[in-house]
Image (spheres, helix red, strand yellow):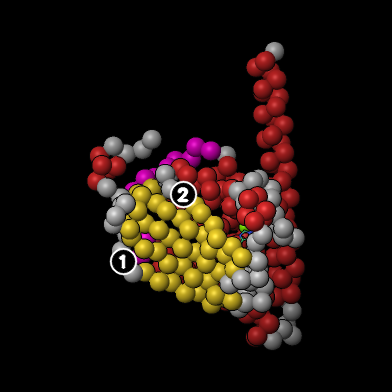
Amino acid sequence: IQEGMIEAEKLKVVSEIAASVAHEVRNPLTTVRGFVQLLGEPSLTDQKRKEFSLITLVELDRAGSIISDYLSLAKPQNQKLEPISLNEEFLETSHVLSSYANLQNVKMVTEFHSSGIIYGDKSKLRQAIINLCKNAVEAMPDGGTLTIKYFVDESDNKARIYISDTGVGMTKEQVKRLGSPYYSTKLKGTGLGTMVTFNIIREMNGQISIESKEGEGTTFIITLPLHTKKEEAAPGK
Ligand code: ADP
Ligand code: MG
């Protein structure tokens, strides 16, 4: 009976998750459909055409990242563990994010003072960083600056990554709620981004701390162990 109960409970969770994925993904798709229709207007100016294509791309990416967030909740995927160059990683991340940031009048600044290598799954790390950067951009509705920087701390063999925005900031209570499922203050939010990010960083044996001030902005500080040869000798967990 016990077993049956657990199965029924699991099925309930699965169907709830399926329902929310469907719901969340439908919103960006509806937006995309509308703009694709507008793009077919012959009278459209070049300026508008560019703007609408950009919105279409951003919304499609949004649908994509909602799907990856839900997928990474669905547990063991094939992890590919490898050494990751933080310089390369952040270069690519800022490339991926630049059109989104542009659209919201956000200036992106990257600052690397050293070259750090960590160890883990590249696509997961990217998902974690992009979730934080997206939140940063979304916290600056009137534009602002998103700064990504990192330092290598030789004293404890760790890389310290700082992701800062000059946005709305959070109260202490809001900071405490970060990472709990479905916590969102946004109209179009899923409330999964920070939870997924926290899980990924924890899996990588890292830590996250948050400094935030209402009306001034927020900084996420991620500490990750630097790559040592040991891990390559005994890969996986
Ligand atoms: P979502 O972005 O879908 O709302 P997240 O889990 O990514 O879900 O974020 C949860 C909530 O945390 C957001 O709705 C927002 O209120 C708050 N938040 C996260 N990052 C920031 C930030 N950089 N500045 C201000 N608020 C933030
Ligand atoms: Mg988010």
Between 144 and 4, the residue placed more toward the observer is 144
Task: Examine the rendered structure and indicate whether residue 200 appears above or below residue 64.
Answer: above
Residue drawn at (69%, 41%), measured in percent from left and top?
Answer: 18
Which mark lies nearer to you, 1 or 2?
A: 2
Dot 1 lies on which element?
Answer: loop
Between 95 and 192, the residue placed more toward the observer is 192
The picture places residue 71, in percent across and down from the top left corner, at: 57, 44
Image disc number at residue 207: 2
The picture places residue 3, in percent across and down from the top left corner, at: 65, 17
**Splitting the image into 4 quarters, where does residue 57 fall?**
bottom right
Residue drawn at (61%, 71%), measured in percent from left and top?
Answer: 216
State the residue position of label 1.
114
Q: Is residue 53 magenta?
A: no
The picture places residue 9, in percent across and down from the top left corner, at: 70, 27
Q: Which residues are magenta?
A: 75-88
The picture places residue 59, in percent across and down from the top left corner, at: 65, 64
Task: Examine the rendered structure and indicate whether residue 110 appears above or below residue 79.
Answer: below
Crowding at mark 2 (Cα within 10 Å: few <14, some 14-19, many 20+): some
Q: Is residue 130 shown to the viewer in this render?
A: no
Task: Examine the rendered structure and indicate whether residue 31 appears above or below residue 73.
Answer: below
Residue drawn at (67%, 59%), measured in percent from left and top?
Answer: 171
Q: Quadrant of the N terminus?
A: top right
Ligand 1: does it lie within 8 Å of the C-beta at label 1? no
**Picture quarter with ligand 2:** bottom right
CA separation in Å, label 1 and label 2: 20 Å
Dot 2 lies on which element?
Answer: strand
Specify the amino acid type for callout 2. Gln
**Label located before the other in sequence (1 or 2):** 1
User: Marks 2 and 1: in contact by CB < 8 Å?
Assistant: no
Crowding at mark 1 (Cα within 10 Å: few <14, some 14-19, many 20+): few
